[in-house]
Amino acid sequence: MKNGKPTWWSRTSTTGTDTADTPDGPPEPADDADFTLAAPAAAPEPASAPAPAPTPVSDPAADAPAASEPTPPQAPAPVVPEPVVPAEPVAPEPVVPAAQATDAPAAEAPEAVPAVPAAPVAYPDPGPAPVPPQQAPQPLHAPDPYATPPYGEPGPWAPAPPVQRPVPPAAAMPQGPAPVPAPPVPAPPGAVHAPAPGPVPPAPPAGPPVGPAYDPWGAQPVLPGAGKPPRKPRRGLALVGALAFALVTGVIGGGVGAYVERHGGISAIELPQSDAKDIGRAPDSVAGIAATALPSVVTIHVSGGGSAGTGTGFVLDTRGHILTNNHVVDAAASSGEISVTFSNGESARAKLIGRDTGYDLAVIKVSGVSGLKPLALGNSDDVRVGDPVVAIGAPFDLSNTVTSGIISAKERPITAGGEKGDGSDVSYVDALQTDAPINPGNSGGPLVDSAARVIGINSAIRAAGGGADPEGGQSGSIGLGFAIPINQGKRVAEELINTGKATHPVIGVSLDMRYTGDGARVGAKGAGSAPSVTPDGPADKAGFRPGDVITKVDGQRVHSGEELIVKIRAHRPGDTLKLTVTRDGKEQTKTLTLGSSTGA
């Protein structure tokens, strides 16, 4: 039974237009019967029934291809036995003896070759027999395109049946002695026409071995590569390998780069450097200002009276006069030594020309020094808050130190000194405030503007630690430095050079320094039971009385007696001032001309 399995037909290839038979195999049956190949050199089985008449075939020699174009040998395809279905009865055909159809000469056969089928007997061709239409057997199950054999059609993975190689024609291959066919037996009338048993198929010619017959229901030989799962692409492995290679090369490259960077490779390290040349600086830059001012700045060393100190000064003229602070040279006021060191390293001795404690200014002079370069003086009245400034000095004995900043404020009333306790060493300064770093040793040095002109003399700093002794742990600069305006310093320096003393502007009153109210109050009495208002002095002439409170000077507010002194000393003797006075709760404005007194 077929059991729904497909039938694999074994057929030979045809040539020409005749589809009845071919010389390469047995004739194709006209019905649905199956055939199997007979073994070589085997005798046909005896017929148990009357032998049917053979089917007429054409002359193999006539249908064979030319000798110049041999047909490649083709192995016979295996067939599957199936039950024979009887064909429709056909009319009997005349039988022609097989001896009449033998046309191929037997003398041309070579010796010792495999047996080949003898030429078929030629019969008169009555024409193709009518083949009734047969109904193809239906499988038990519908074909499943995705199923595997044997339940559906052969899957795409099923091996193809072996190629059936065509049998070469008799004229193109060696022939052996032809076997004598059995005489045909005429078929009785009414018998079913069946194909006559053909000659024994010859042995396959020598050539490449032919594989076993293909049986779709039997065990198949394992072909090379068959049954193995498809090899998956190794993209993941390739990616991992590429990443590992990149990581290794990156680590090696980084290590080599780090080694070369640290050790300079195999050659000696040679750092790049620009060529040495004199590069100019803008005159108003800090470097340009320092280059202009430094040759005129000196470092002062003072010793005497059991103490020593360091300060700064600057050259006023070519005759050797140098301006500095009084507290710098105070130790050598009575006896001591003063030495000056210039910016080029040369040193010279100096002597004290004059000093004033009220203004905290002093003038010294060097002798026998040539090539002095005076420092230009500016005008402190033209200074504005925010103007850039440069401070030059020797902080902590570090000579020729340059710092820069701006003008933080003007007319700051400050007092300095007072170490003696009697007030004789107290200085009253209407100062310029700057944030340029100023430290002990900067005292007496110049504070210059952007044109390298002196606008102030560095005199005081506000220390966070409070104390003026550097050995006592005084703090450094906190950005609060104060300088005496150069207009005041110029006047005092000229008086000290010309007369050795400086004059102070006065109004002729004694102030009550213990007054805590707003303003400066005129005392009840002066020193040594003297009147508090000097007779015939500027204040007496203007009508001042004891107990009057002065609140303004030229319209500027004053809050204490120290501030009033600072405002008065900021002017010259002979200047006219307008003072606002409060008496018995009423304000009065009085005008007076400043007098003069000789300072200590």
Image (cartoon, grey):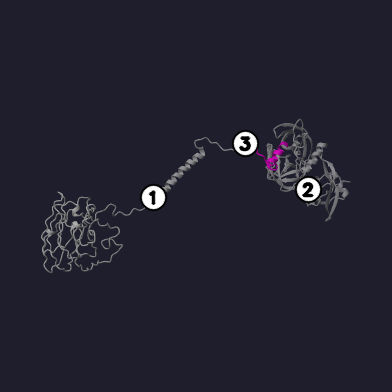
The kind of secondary structure element at disc 1 is helix
**Disc 2 marks which residue?**
563
**Disc 3 marks which residue?**
276
Identified at 25% across, 61% down, the residue is 150
What is the distance, in whole Å, between disc 1 and disc 2 at their CAs? 90 Å
**Disc 1 marks which residue?**
237
Q: Is 145 on the left or on the right of 449, as rendered?
A: left
Q: Which of pointers 1 and 2 lies earlier in the amino acid sequence? A: 1
Q: Is 304 on the left or on the right of 172, as rendered?
A: right
Please tell me how crowded label 1 is: few (under 14), some (14-19), or many (20+) other residues with Cα within 10 Å: few
Residue 457 in picture, x, y percent from top left: 74, 41
Kindly identify the amino acid type of the residue bearing the numbered disc 3.
Ala
Residue mark closest to the camera, 1 vs 2:
1
What is the distance, in whole Å, between disc 2 and disc 3 at their CAs? 55 Å
Kindly identify the amino acid type of the residue bearing the numbered disc 2.
Glu
- Reply yes or no: does residue 146 show up in magenta: no
Question: Which numbered circle lies on residue 418?
Answer: none
Residue mark closest to the camera, 2 vs 3:
3
Q: Is 560 on the left or on the right of 120, as rendered?
A: right
Name which quarter of the figure residue 7 lies in: bottom left
Q: Nearer the viewer, residue 406 or 227?
A: 227
Q: Nearer the viewer, residue 256 or 424?
A: 256
Residue 103 in picture, x, y percent from top left: 15, 56
Magenta-tinted stretch = 276-297
Kindly identify the amino acid type of the residue bearing the numbered disc 1.
Leu
Q: Is residue 499 above or below residue 30?
A: above
Residue 595 in picture, x, y percent from top left: 85, 44
